[in-house]
Structures are given as structure tokens and as C-alpha cells.
Image (cartoon, rainbow, N blue to C red):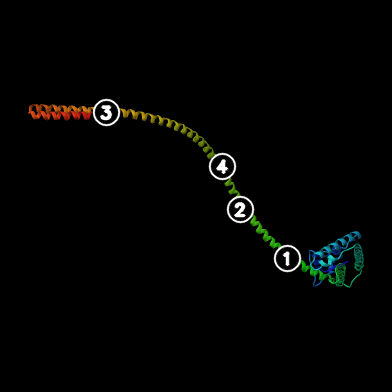
Amino acid sequence: MYYLSPIFINFYRGMGLLTTVEQKQFLLETKVVNDEETLGDNEVASEKYDSLLALPSVKDDKLEDKVEKRARRWLSEEEGSTECSKAASQSRITSAEWAEIEAEIGTEKERTLAFGVKTFGGIRGRKRKSKEVLRRYLDGKMAKYAKPAIAGFYMELVRSRTRAKVAASANVAERVICIQHVHADLTKRDHFHAAESAAKAKKLAHYEVAKSLELEQREKLDADCNKMRSQLSTVEKQLIAIEAKLLEVEGKNQQLADQTDEVMSAKVNRCLHGYVEWEIKTLKWMKLRELEHCVTTLIACSVGGHRQLGRKLDSFISGLEETK
């Protein structure tokens, strides 16, 4: 049974580099009753990992399955790594290599079990041996699946991968923060657009109500216009009939006026003719009286008066003839 420092156990467990079998093989060294085993000066005690794990008996088929899954997962992680992606992509595991891996794991298991039976000189010797065994085991895996150019201590590869993961996690954190800001902005925009859409929907509903009222009023106005047009057409027909009657009446009035003018002109002519005759007769009677007066005066005078009377009678007779 082997022990490993809590620092390395925490590190390898945090990185996910140890399988269940490896965690059970390399146990965490803790205090035992009566202080038979104690932690070193540079070791860290952790309550989370401060437990003593026993090494149960595991069947060979389960061990092989776990080793195969572990190797496949390690290769997938190596493909995602920045430094070992090219080397992992170029390496293909065949069935013969899997057989070699299983044989190596079996021999390593037998060697670790045999090594567990032996006793070392104290706790520190066992820790050093366990570290050396773990490093040889992990370096063997590194040399098996990586190129010789980058094959070295497994801790260097883990350190480089840790740096890459830290940089990737920082980049991911920055991208997550950026995505959160973008999400917040989009959420604000969504709320703003939702409020704006609600306001526009309210305005649209108001406009639709106003439009419906306007359409109703327009329909009423159209009905009134049609009614007034029908009334106007009837009035126009009545006006045409009235105009025809008016023309007929005007014709009759003109005819009557013409007839009246003729009658009146005839009557006026008759009146004027009677008046002229009456005036002529009046003049005649006036001249006759004047002549009678002159005759009476001449009779009373001498013979010269008879001559003058004869001349006046001649002039009177000639004047009567002219008046006729």
C-alpha cells in the first residue's frame, strides 16, 4: 500500500489525471492512532481528502475496461490541448498497442503490490518511493502516447496543460462576461422593444377604433348623399316640368299681350279720332260764334263793313275745308 502527499493528490485529483484504481493505489498519508504516522513539515492536511483509502481487490476485466476508458479520455484531452494536439492527432492506438498497455498495467500492478509488501525505512522513504513509482508510471504513459520531442517528465506536460487551461479559462471567463453584457443589453432591448410594441399596439387599437367610427360615419354620409341625389333627381324632373309649363304660360301671356296691344291700340286710335273730331267741331262752333259776332257788328257799320265781312266768310270757309 502506497501513500502520496496531499499536495500532489489534490493537484492530480483537481486536474482529473488519476483514475479510481490510481486513487486507491496512491493513498493520502494521514495521522493514525497513537501518532504512529504523521504529516511532514511541507505537507498540507485537508479534511476533504484526509481519509485513508483501502486497496480492494478488483477484477482484471474491470481493470482493463477502466484502463481502456482512461487511455481514451487522456487521448481526447491531449487532442484538446494546445501543445500536444498535433502529437495526439498523429498517434493512433491499435489493438496490439492496447495489448501492450494492458500487459504494462498488469506488470505495474503486480510490481506495486509486491512493492507494497516490502517495508521501507520510515514514512519518508515510502513517500519517495510512491512518488517515484507514480512518476515512472505517468512518464511511461507520456512516452507511450506522445512524441519523443515532447516526452519528458509528466509534471512538465501537466504544468503546460495547466497554463493552457488557465489561459483558456480566463478567455472563457472574459467571453462569458462579454456574453453576459450582451445578454443584458439584449434583455434591455427586448424590454424596450416590448414596451414600444405594446405602445404601438395600443395606438394601433385606438387607430382601428377611430377608423371603424370614421367608416361608419362615411357609410352614413354615403347613404345621405344617395338619398339627397335621388331627391335632387326628382326635383330636377319637377323643375323641367315646371319650366315647360312656364314656357307655355309665357307663350299664352305673350299671345294675350299681343291681342291686348292690338285692342288697346284700336281703342286708343278710336279715342284719338273722336277727340280730334270733337276738337274740330269745337273750333267750328267757336269760329261760328265769332263770325256771328262780326256779322252783327258789320251790319251795324257801313258798306265797307259788308266787304270785310265777305272776305272773312271766304277765309272761314277755306279754313273749314282745310280742317276736313
Quadrant of res 181: bottom right
Q: Secondary structure at mark 4?
A: helix
Amino acid type for the residue under numbered disc 3: His
Q: Disc 4 or 3, which lies upstream in sequence?
A: 4
**For mark 3, what is the residue?**
273
Quadrant occupied by the N terminus:
bottom right
Q: CA distance from mark 4 to mark 3?
A: 83 Å
Amino acid type for the residue under numbered disc 2: Glu
Point 57% across, 47% down: residue: 207
Q: Residues within 10 Å of mark 1 (few under 14, many from 20)?
A: few
Question: Residue 259, percent across and down?
Answer: 36, 28
Q: CA distance from mark 3 to mark 2?
A: 106 Å
Given this view, does label 4 or label 3 mark the residue nearer the observer?
3
Q: Secondary structure at mark 2?
A: helix
Amino acid type for the residue under numbered disc 4: Leu
Q: Is 316 in front, or is 173?
A: 316
Question: Residue 21, percent across and down?
Answer: 86, 63
Question: Can I make out residue 274 in this image?
Answer: yes
Quadrant of res 310: top left
Point 77% across, 68% down: residue: 164
Q: CA distance from mark 1 to mark 3?
A: 140 Å
**For mark 1, what is the residue?**
171
Amino acid type for the residue under numbered disc 1: Asn
**For mark 4, what is the residue?**
215
Q: Is 247 in front, or is 13?
A: 247
Given this view, does label 3 or label 2 mark the residue nearer the observer?
3
Given this view, does label 2 or label 4 mark the residue nearer the observer?
4
